[in-house]
Amino acid sequence: MTRNIETLIDGVRQQVIDWRRHLHAHPELSFEEYETSKFIVRTLEEIGGIDISHPSGTSVVGRLIGAKPGPVIAIRADFDALPIQEETGLPFASKVANKMHACAHDGHTSILLGVAKILAEMREDLAGEIRFLFQNGEETPPGGSRGMIAGGAMRGVDRVIGLHLWAPIEIGTIQINPTNVMAACDIFEIRIHGEGGHIGAPHKAVDPIAVGSQIVNNLQHIVARDIDPLDAAVVGVTGFQSGISVGVIPPTAVLTGGTNVFSPQARDLLERRIGEVAQGIAAAHGARCEYSYTWVYDAVINDPDTAAIVDRVAADLFGRDNVQDLPPIMPGEDFSFFGQQAPSCFILLGAGNAAKGITAPHHDAKFDIDEDALAMGTQLFVKAALELLENTPPRV
């Protein structure tokens, strides 16, 4: 390359931080990211030389077409926030009540804007296209990736990469697995129909709370006794709604929850067994139940060849000891659907720092990231994109 890449990267370091802080202070929820979308478009327009489109809703795609023909490499970042009241006390904390960037999507978007700025400066040296995928609605099913795909965002893409700033991993550590990265995640609802009555006459009622409690306890036996111990799986009940008066046995109760799993066979088993357990227990106690199970996000599975290229880049940048094949993690991510369209690599980039007190988990009111990870992500994406352009065979 004729330009000094390191100088370009250093030139955007502070700007990426500033972008992140602006986005952090102005969070918007899934599929409502109107101002964030405008900010992304405005920034790409200021960078210049990038074709901009909206394949679906508030999503944004930027196409940087190099001076010479070559493959198409896509890079993805998400930008929605969560319905959480921030408690970090940061000077750039959320200015919007009950909305917060508690999962680092502000950092992902800022990194990708920095990458766009750097690569736009290198357009004359590029052989191929870099496609910037700014995704809306990652946090809320059905997710934004499928809408973007339906709108043509992945048309012609040869490889796609993405990352997640990950607070449970210390700053400086990068996880690049050759295959399994993040689990599939689904949701279920169990609606129990009993018979209401007076708390003082339980024998004349069918208590859906008592039935629901039995269901909650027994669902744990599915993972303990039905799933192969070598297959990771989670079944969690996260909602239990019933009753409005202390003296009344209510007629209904609703359980909601989710599952996380890698194996397709285990996923099928969870869907079937949750319903069987719930219906069996309800029937045993004279109640009945309605059961629904919704597949949400498939597992994030890396393409080994693409992951190997990105792994080499990361090792050259940050040292082999800092690039690790760590155990897969159980939360889900709808990057999986981009990865089903083209060979992909999804990276977990350490963003926690115990020495700085940055230890809160994702989706927590005190969540934060070490902003030094932003420069690492920018470097990694720029160098990986260039390497993938050079190492991706032309389409036949």
Image (cartoon, rainbow, N blue to C red):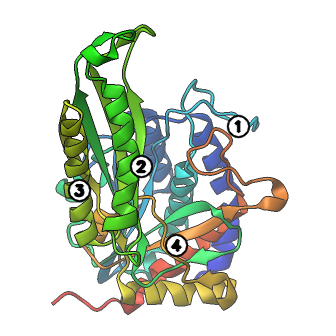
Side of 49 where 325 appears, left or right: right
Q: Foreground residue, 106 or 46?
A: 106
Query: With respect to residue 279, does 52 lie above or below?
Result: below
Circle 1 SS class: loop
Q: Decide if residue 135 is in sight here.
A: no
Measured in 3D between alpha carbons, the distance from the residue under mark 3 to the one under mark 1, in whole angstroms, is 46 Å
- First in sequence, mark 4 or 1: give its number: 1
- First in sequence, mark 3 or 2: give its number: 2
Q: How many marks?
A: 4
Q: Which mark is residue 92?
A: 1
In front: mark 3 or mark 1? Answer: 3
Amino acid type, mark 1: Phe
Circle 2 SS class: strand
In front: mark 4 or mark 2? Answer: 2
Amino acid type, mark 2: Gly
Query: With respect to residue 155, does 220 lie above or below?
Result: above
Q: Which mark is residue 236?
A: 2
Residue found at x 46% / y 44%: 42
Q: What is the quadrant of residue 172 in the picture?
A: bottom right
Q: Which residue is mark 4?
A: 381
In front: mark 3 or mark 4? Answer: 3
Measured in 3D between alpha carbons, the distance from the residue under mark 3 to the one under mark 4, in whole angstroms, is 42 Å
Q: Which mark is residue 138?
A: none
Q: Decide if residue 214 is in sight here.
A: yes
Residue 368: % across, % down: 68, 49
